[in-house]
Amino acid sequence: MNPTKLFIVVASSNGWLGSFLSNGKPAEDFSIHGLWPNYNNGKWPSNCDRKNSFNQSEISDLVSRMQKDWPTLACPSGDGFKFWSHEWDKHGTCTTLDQHTYFQSALDLKKKANLLQVLKNAGIQPGKFYSLESVKQAIEEGIGYAPSIECNVDSSGNNQLFQVYLCVDTSASNFIQCPVFPHERCGSEIEFPSFSDQLDSHDEL
């Protein structure tokens, strides 16, 4: 059974703050979490070809872009290769893409989505609260397809924009409408957190 779609999952760097503190201030932008194959019933394959393991020489020309747009989430921060190896072995091997195409496609999709600019165009800025529906509507109007939003909860109990799921075709070329999304865990009002606010509250780290 072949996957019917792929999710490009992008995370607010603010949501990964603890992972970045040891490596300096992250860019206040979204970064890639993964490009994940899924079925229309909500299930997904994983680790489909253990013989086709990650080979960093296959992506040598992409490393600088990946370190900027697909940084490791580990703490302390590393060079990214362990994280990218995990993503390829677990998810990439279940696509029809070779390693270079898999990673380049994710980078190109992130650039194509341009989520930070899409939200800014709708007046949605880091450091403020917005209704969940207004954030989703802004992304749908900017990209042409509805997203799914995942939130985390800060120490004050506020729901924060954490990850955005967008559906793409199995060639990882175009956004498409998703028949099913992951379960959303957000309140009706969410914060688009700013890095500076979170940095001030994590001085002890």
Image: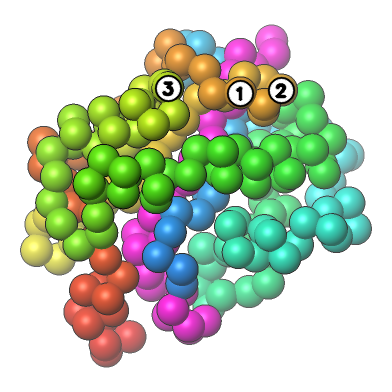
Determine which of the numbered discs, if any, sits on residue 171 in the image.
Answer: 2
| Quadrant of the snapshot with the C terminus | bottom left
Q: Which numbered disc, 2 or 3, marks the residue that appears first in the sequence?
A: 3
Magenta extent: 1-25
Q: Which residue is mark 1?
A: 174
- Marks 1/2 in contact by CB < 8 Å: the verdict is yes
The structure residue drawn at horizontal position 61% and vertical position 23%, both measured from the top left corner, is: 174
Decide whether residue 83 is among the magenta residues: no
Q: Tag 3: Cα neighbours inside 10 Å, few (<14), some, or many (≥20)? A: some
Location of residue 144 in the rendering, given as x and y in whole percent from the top left corner: 42, 22
Report the front residue among 173 and 85: 173
Residue 39 percent location from the top left of the image = 55, 16
Label 2 or label 3, whichever lies nearer to me, is: 3
| Residue drawn at 52 percent across, 81 percent down | 23
The quadrant of the picture occupied by the N terminus is top right
Count of labels shown? Answer: 3
Q: Do callouts 2 and 3 mark residues in contact (Cβ within 8 Å)?
A: no
Q: Amino acid at mark 2?
A: Ser
SS of the residue at dot 2? Answer: loop
How far from the left and from the top, in percent, is residue 157?
A: 10, 57
Residue extending furthest toward the bottom: 204
Q: Is residue 124 visible?
A: yes
Does residue 60 appear to the left or right of 168 in the view shown?
right
User: Which circle marks residue 144 in the picture?
Assistant: 3
Whichever of callouts 3 and 1 sits on the residue coming sooner in the sequence is 3
User: Where 145 falls versus 32 (above or below)?
Assistant: above
> What kind of element bears circle 3?
loop
Nearer to me, 156 or 166? 166
- Left-right relation of 149 to 82: left
